[in-house]
Amino acid sequence: MSGSSNVAAMKKVVQQLRLEASVTRVKVSQAAVDLKQFCLQNAQHDPLLTGVSSSTNPFRPQKVCSFL
């Protein structure tokens, strides 16, 4: 029984290696350029860079409601 499970495990490994070998590669320098371009294009939508208005901030401190 151990032999057949070993064969099945090895088939899974071979299948994974074939999948990884078929992935198209990109040079690191090209990936860095693409990443920089993406960041610059989407900077105006990044709340860490532009901030969040207090009216739309879901994490603002809750107001205390008091009845007189």
Image (cartoon, rainbow, N blue to C red):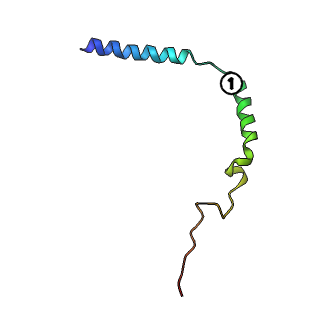
Considering every residue shown, the one lying at the far left of the view is: 1
Residue 8 pos. (x, y %)? 34, 15
Q: Position of residue 28 (x, y in %)?
A: 68, 24
At x 69%, y 61%, the residue is 53
Q: Residue furthest bottom?
A: 68
Q: Amino acid at mark 1?
A: Val
Task: Judge whether 54 appears above or below 14 on screen.
Answer: below
The secondary structure type at the circle numbered 1 is: helix
Q: Total number of numbered labels?
A: 1
Please report the residue visible at 72 percent of the width from the left and 39 percent of the height from the top: 39
Occupied quadrant, residue 27: top right
Quadrant occupied by the N terminus = top left
Q: Is residue 62 left or right of residue 8?
A: right
Residue at position x 64%, y 61% in the image: 56
x and y, in percent, of residue 41 in the image: 75, 40
- The residue singled out by tag 1 in the image is 28
